[in-house]
Image (cartoon, grey):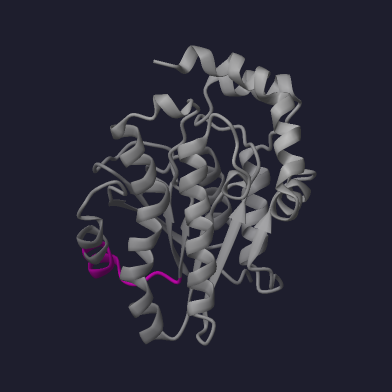
Amino acid sequence: MSALSDQTWLLLGASGGIGGALLDRLLDAGATVIVTARKSTTSGYWAGRERVIQATLDLSADNLGEQLKALLSEYGVPDGVIHCAGVNRFVDVEGNDDRSLNEMLNVNLRSPMVLARELTPAFRRRGHGTYLFVGSTFGSIGYPGYSAYCASKFGLRGFVEALRRELADTDIRVRYVAPRATRTTMNGSEVEALNEALGNHMDAPDTVAAEIMATLGKESRRACIFIGWPEKLFVRINALLPLLVDKALSKQLPIIQHYLKDRTP
């Protein structure tokens, strides 16, 4: 029997490519899954599926904390939560308007912090629980055209690291998984073309979902997982010898700028 059988999990970002693949795997493992959307809906990828509970939650809202309190009051405390919701935008720094910046920072960084604030006391009272946050390789490597996205994901990685250490004396598990480029609808056509021009590897959502599920397994003791080779090597090089990465990216910059030009207001 699966370790997740008869458990309830909160899955944030279930309508995305990675989230949809995770939903399938969680259900196959026997879990009941609470999925969320900004507005109440009876349609979508999860509509009509057994052991799927639909809830309303706006991760970018100022009152997210109150919404989470209401969700926990109605559905109870889940055994674990996977936060794989995210907002991305491929644009140069001049193109980061206030609205997109607010949404990106609220969804990618603020919402995990509010989630942990609201859920950790309940996990403590029960004595166990699991957080899994989906980050990005760009949470460790600053990349041209993604300055705001990188900032939000760098912040997420730092928050999760601190949270894991803060809860080290409890049975609350904190995990972080950082995918490389993934084929999802979050990517525009110019991003797909850029990755192809640069020869960047792109994983299928189900490949990433399989890595995440393995991280949830009892056999996994790794708290921080980077997906993909050579990207995981670049993460280490960037941490130790950032000037080498500067030089490598400077060679790519003309190609990146070519695909950025159509996105500049």
Percent across and percent down for residue 67 are 22, 58
Farthest residue, direction front: 243
Q: Is residue 99 left or right of residue 93?
A: left
- Is residue 5 visible in this depiction of the protein? no
* Segment colored magenta: 70-79
Percent across and percent down for residue 79 are 45, 72
Q: Which residue is drawn at 44% across and 86% down?
A: 127
State the residue in front, 31 or 260.
260
Q: Which quarter of the rendered picture does the C terminus lie within?
A: top left
Percent across and percent down for residue 141 are 63, 45
Q: Which residue is drawn at 40% across and 58% down?
A: 112
State the residue in front, 84 or 34.
84
Q: In this view, does 82 lie to the left or right of 105?
A: right
Q: Which residue is drawn at 42% across and 48% down?
A: 108
Let me know if residue 74 is in the magenta part.
yes
Percent across and percent down for residue 135 are 55, 51
Residue 191 vs 151, above or below: the answer is above
State the residue in front, 165 or 120.
165
Q: Which quarter of the rendered picture does the N terminus lie within?
A: bottom right
Residue 252 vs 41, above or below: the answer is above
- Is residue 127 visible in this depiction of the protein? yes
